[in-house]
Amino acid sequence: MALLTKKDTKLILDPLADNNPITIQVLGICSALAITAELNASIVMAVSVLFVLGLGNVVISLMRNIIPSKIRIIVQLVVVAALVIIVDQVLKAFAYELSKTLAVFVGLIITNCIIMGRFEAFALGNGVWRSFLDGIGNAAGYGIILIIVGFFRELLGSGTLLGIPVLGNPIDKTGLYSIGYENNGFMLLSPMALIVVGILIWIQRSRNKALIEEN
Amino acid sequence: MLEHVELFFKSIFIDNMVFATFLGMCSYLAVSKKVATAVGLGAAVIFVLAVTVPLNWLLDQYILRDGALAWLGPEYADYNLSFLSFILFIATIATMVQLVEIVVEKFSPALYNSLGIFLPLIAVNCAILGGSLFMQAREIATLGLAFNYGLSSGIGWFLAILAIAAIREKIRYSNVPPPLRGLGITFIITGLMAIGFMSFGGMLTGGDEAPAPEPTTAQKSEIEKTTLEKEKQEKAVSYNTIVKE
């Protein structure tokens, strides 16, 4: 492909697995965990971060030669804050219920470490197109974890996906519930998000031994 | 007075920043390998939260919220600038952190040497912005309460990072499965600690605050039952692991 050289593809694909922002780089966990009790909220959060990180990386990369390095943190914060305000206002206008569920966590995208981390590590030193790809790749890596965690928490916790019951009706005892299956309400509580991510890390690292840390 | 005491304990234990809302997780995970550095970062977080939350409370009260500009004159009374709160809060935090850094460096080099390296990190710590945003969302009523809220959430964060750092120092001597080493086991321990902290819920409010939204009223009793049972089991497990170590 002319548009994406091999190196560019690597920029997008690397963060999806072996250099994942959440499980390997330990970035952006703050806002990731609290909102994953429902798949719906996880998807919206993933898309918001994709938008903010993709565009933010482009803006910072465009300005990389005119930002004095002493005040770069403040400049970066202002750029992210402006983008997040856009996301917040759009959510409030078109998905009010959802924006109530996400509450302050939309605002907390500003201090999401992935965003500052990518600005510092990549956008300040690379061209616009590459920065954009890097932003998209990292946001997608973040989104994938969010969606996996949201999928399992909603499925096991309330037996629904995107609000649609998929395992049958727990009150009428249809579907899986007819053979004695019960929802695990514990999955809806916040500590389980941490444990699910812990298990994901476990699986990933047992598949790829190179990622194992020394104690 | 009573509301101060209530808010204080509530923000430390029930609404603990790390265990209930996952704020500041990045630095919590990255800087918790040693107790000494954890204490430094924790102290800096307490300090910055106690300064920025009241400041942002003033901003919210007199500039941002609906009708807050009324003190300028009646023609400004219907302005609602609350959509600007993200950008103003983060700007305040970034400048305050910078200012604090300069002042501390000038007047107390010893403190600067122990806190200094952590201060720039703090500007992008979710716990700090989260403190201000929760202060706004929960509509904290007075400046004193806002200060109290900042201080006590900071203390809660400090406790959390201190606990995990101590556990991580000890865990080095135990035989963790290799793929779980480092990050994985830290996540799981934090989860177990969060379950432990959930037992504080209902300490002050009598249990009228549910820790997580429950899907339907029909499922409610069922969920509550399983949750209680699970909680008991998990608590026992986490207690055992801590005791073992």
Image: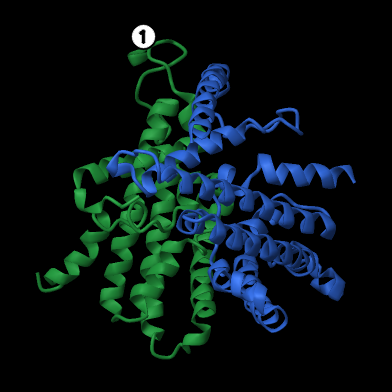
Chain colours: A green, B blue
Decide if residue B51 is on the left or right side of residue A52. Answer: right
Instruction: Please name whichever residue, B240 or A75, is drawn nearer the observer in this view of the structure.
Output: B240
The residue that appears at 55% across and 38% down in the rendered structure is B194
In the rendered image, the residue lying farthest to the front is B173
The residue that appears at 39% across and 27% down in the rendered structure is A156
Q: Numbered disc 1: what chain?
A: A
Residue B162: % across, % down: 58, 50
The part of the image, by quadrant, that contains residue B68 is: bottom right
Disc 1 secondary structure class: helix
**Number of numbered tags placed on the structure image:** 1
> Vertically, is A133 above or below B240?
below
Task: Please indicate, yes or no, whether residue A214 appears anywhere in the rendered image.
Answer: yes
The part of the image, by quadrant, that contains residue A21 is: bottom left
Residue B150: % across, % down: 72, 57
> Vertically, is B88 above or below B15?
below
Q: Amino acid at mark 1?
A: Ser
The residue that appears at 60% across and 33% down in the rendered structure is B198
- Identify the residue position indicated by label 1 in the image: A178
The part of the image, by quadrant, that contains residue B10 is: top right
Instruction: Please name whichever residue, B67 or A48, is drawn nearer the observer in this view of the structure.
Output: A48
Instruction: Please name whichever residue, B242 or B206, is drawn nearer the observer in this view of the structure.
Output: B242
